[in-house]
Image: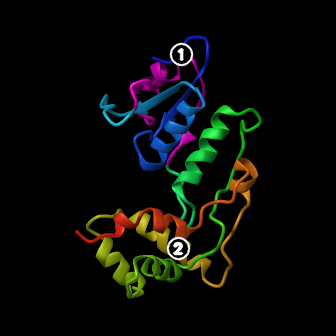
Amino acid sequence: MTQPGRPAVLFSGATGQIGRGVVDLLLDADVPVRALTRSADASTLPANVDVVTGDLTVPESLDEALDGVDAAAYGAAETAVVDERDVAAVAALALWRDGHAGGDYVLTGPEPLSQAEQVGIIGEVLHRQIPFEELSPEEFRRVTQASWPAPVVDMLLTAWSATIGTPALVTTTVRDILGIQPRSFRQWVTDNQAAFTLR
């Protein structure tokens, strides 16, 4: 259960990669955490996290989750070049430190990188040549049709098309809030080399 007398932070997505990082940072700051999950399985969360079940699409299921809560974060915010540890750190700080209520933050990594450049960096870190083959929109739809919803594929293709010829947005939000430079994509690849190992 959460600590008596202190409002808890309700967190949806606490079992995800970014979400779990936010939970750990909040606990390190002695902030009570309540995790909202669709099932009662809390095996991946620390014992001192108050786990409640509920569904964001079913408002009446959230009464228990919202009791005694004064803040709520979604761990689904993603970008190609921002490190999930930086996202987690900003989210955790914004949830418990005064002055961030209602804030609307755009988080990015320190440098704009095309997808081809990202693949190149992965190859450099792994010390091997990785070919980059660009698919046509039709080919991309064909290879993803069995696993990705069509509206998601259309959204991605539209977003990617809109960036052609336009410099990527780079913000200073991570540095402004945390007081440190955001981790680079190269650093992320270096720290996660095992994830790229073929099994």
Q: Which residue is mark 2?
A: 158
Looking at the rendered structure, the kind of residue marked 1 is Gln
Q: Find residue 15 and report its horizontal and vertical position in percent.
A: 40, 41
Q: Nearer the viewer, residue 199 or 34?
A: 199
Residue 192: quarter of image: bottom left
Placement of the C terminus among the 4 image quadrants: bottom left
Label 1 SS: loop
**Residue drawn at 48 percent across, 20 percent down:** 63
Left or right of residue 93: residue 153: left
**Residue drawn at 73 percent across, 39 percent down:** 100
Q: What's the magenta region?
A: 46-75
Circle nearer the N terminus (1, 2): 1
Q: Which residue is mark 1?
A: 3
Q: Find residue 16 and report its horizontal and vertical position in percent.
A: 41, 46
Q: Nearer the viewer, residue 14 or 54?
A: 14
Q: Find residue 159 and report its horizontal and vertical position in percent.
A: 55, 71
